[in-house]
Amino acid sequence: MKRRIDLEEKLLDFLYSWLRPIRIGDLKKELEKDNTAIPHSSINSIIKRLVDDELVTWQKYGPISLTQKGQQQAAHKQRHFHLLIMFFMDTLNLSHLEAKKESYTIASVISCTMIEQINRELNNPQKCHCNEAIPRVEECIARS
């Protein structure tokens, strides 16, 4: 079976923003409310892979929570995501929606060196345009 990294990232992003443990049934409902397209049949498989990768903890019928490793990985991607949105909006005059769409596509593949250059170009913002904090991630800073 082909591993869907994009769906795993969506689930990690959701758990990162949710900030607390959540049961699978509630997770499915919240994802539907959030218009996050993860097929119902895929959620258990994705969660099991994330457990195997030590990014989440979960036991059958129990809540799902991010591990420290999962939090760091999600924060790292969020840093890339928010800085790219700001760069696209400020430099290329894209709308927030366009910038968000483009950023989601490339946030996980752009180098930390490039992200830190963008961060310096934007004068090291603490918050993005949507007023969310931009995570400070030591591993990203160390790689630049």
Image (cartoon, rainbow, N blue to C red):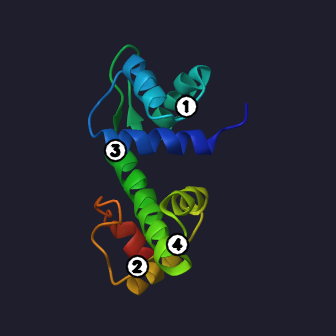
Q: Are marks 2 and 3 in contact (CB under 8 Å)?
A: no
15 w.r.t. 101: above or below: above
x and y, in percent, of residue 96 in the image: 48, 61
Residue tagged 1: 46
Where, quadrant-wise, is the N terminus in this rendering? top right
Describe residue 57's horizontal placement relative to residue 43 as left or right: left
Q: Residue at x 35, y 44 (%)?
A: 16
Q: CA distance from mark 2 to mark 3?
A: 22 Å
Q: Residue at x 39, y 75 (%)?
A: 142
Answer few, some or many: residues within 10 Å of disc 1's Cα (few below 14, many 20 plus, some between 14 and 19).
Answer: some
Residue 17 is labelled as 3
Residue tagged 2: 119
The quadrant in which residue 132 appears is bottom left
x and y, in percent, of residue 69 in the image: 37, 49
Residue tagged 4: 88
Q: Earlier in the sequence, mark 4 or mark 1?
A: 1
Q: Earlier in the sequence, mark 1 or mark 3?
A: 3
Q: Amino acid at mark 4?
A: Phe
